[in-house]
Amino acid sequence: MALAVLLGGCGAAGQGSAPSPSDAGSGLAPTAAPEAEDAAGLSTACTTFWGDPEYADPLSRTVLARAASAPEVGPSDPDFFALTGDDIETAFEGAPASAQGTAAVLADWFRAEPVRGAEADLDAFRTAWEGLAASCQEVSAAAQWAVAPGEDGTKPAALVCADVFDTPGTLTHFANANVLTSNMFKLVGLSPRAVPAGREQDLRDTAGLLAAEIAAVDDDAVRSALEQVRAPFQDALEGDTWSDGLSGPLTELGTACEAIGYSSPGTGEIDNDAVLGASAGDQHGTNLGGRS
């Protein structure tokens, strides 16, 4: 009897230690599920930040505008800029650790640099911006183009339209919170005007920026309209210092953008002194009062 009890106990113990088929199957889940969760978390975070594929007022646009305004107004309200850092980290809180790390670098810039005012390190901002873009480049076209130019004819037209109408020029040669259209008005006007003297480098750089968008865009109608937007800059560089203005070309570009699903400001919403964009109501940055 003792031997039977002992053998029975050993059998029960053996049965308790052997994994059931369901247990064995569940052992595979911890390696596969986190990968899927990481991919989904990265996609969600990057879409929130960069705005693919509609590019309708993404967080990245607000970040650019506030970075541009930080040297001027950062010391007056550093807590406001620190909140931008919080917004960045919140957007990436469900992303993989590597992406959270690059987001934290950009977030920390907003906590440390705006308070320094004119001494704010904008090169460090660019580095942090490009680092976050690199984390998202596999899932975001906007991030991919922020890292480096792609092949000609492959940039989504909606992204090109957003870059022209609604994206602050923080990282362009203008280095301000104004969007490209507003910066262009200062050179060749919305309405006919004389091109101001002494702005040849700005004219050249703007023509080059537009040429890059023309080569990159994947839509023929948007490309054709951009060529008309670029024309007065080329004319001025060739010696014709009277501009017919950008009202007509921008109307054509707006129509082409509408056709591919991007809603840009109409000419009735634009004037020579307006600063247009999608992040309306930023109390410290420039008022970006268009629509996207």
Image (tube, rainbow, N blue to C red):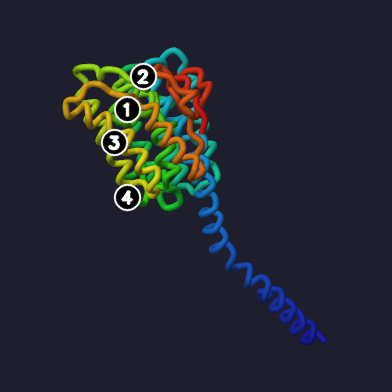
Residue type, numbered disc 2: Pro
Indicate which label's residue lies in the foreground, 4 or 3.
3
Residue 138, percent across and down? 42, 53
Q: CA distance from mark 4 to mark 3?
A: 14 Å
Indicate which label's residue lies in the foreground, 4 or 1.
4
Marked residue nearer the N-terminal end (4 or 3): 4
SS type, badge 2: helix
Which dot marks residue 122? 1
Q: CA distance from mark 2 to mark 4?
A: 31 Å
Marked residue nearer the N-terminal end (3 or 2): 2
- Find disc 3 in the rendering and name its residue: 209
- Find disc 4 in the rendering and name its residue: 150
Q: CA distance from mark 3 to mark 1?
A: 20 Å
Establish if 218 lies above or below 106: below
Marked residue nearer the N-terminal end (1 or 2): 2
Residue type, numbered disc 1: Leu
Count of numbered tags = 4
Circle 3/circle 2 CB separation < 8 Å: no
Circle 1/circle 2 CB separation < 8 Å: yes
- Find disc 2 in the rendering and name its residue: 71
Residue at the image point whose x is 37% and y is 22% from the top: 190
Establish if 37 lies above or below 89: below
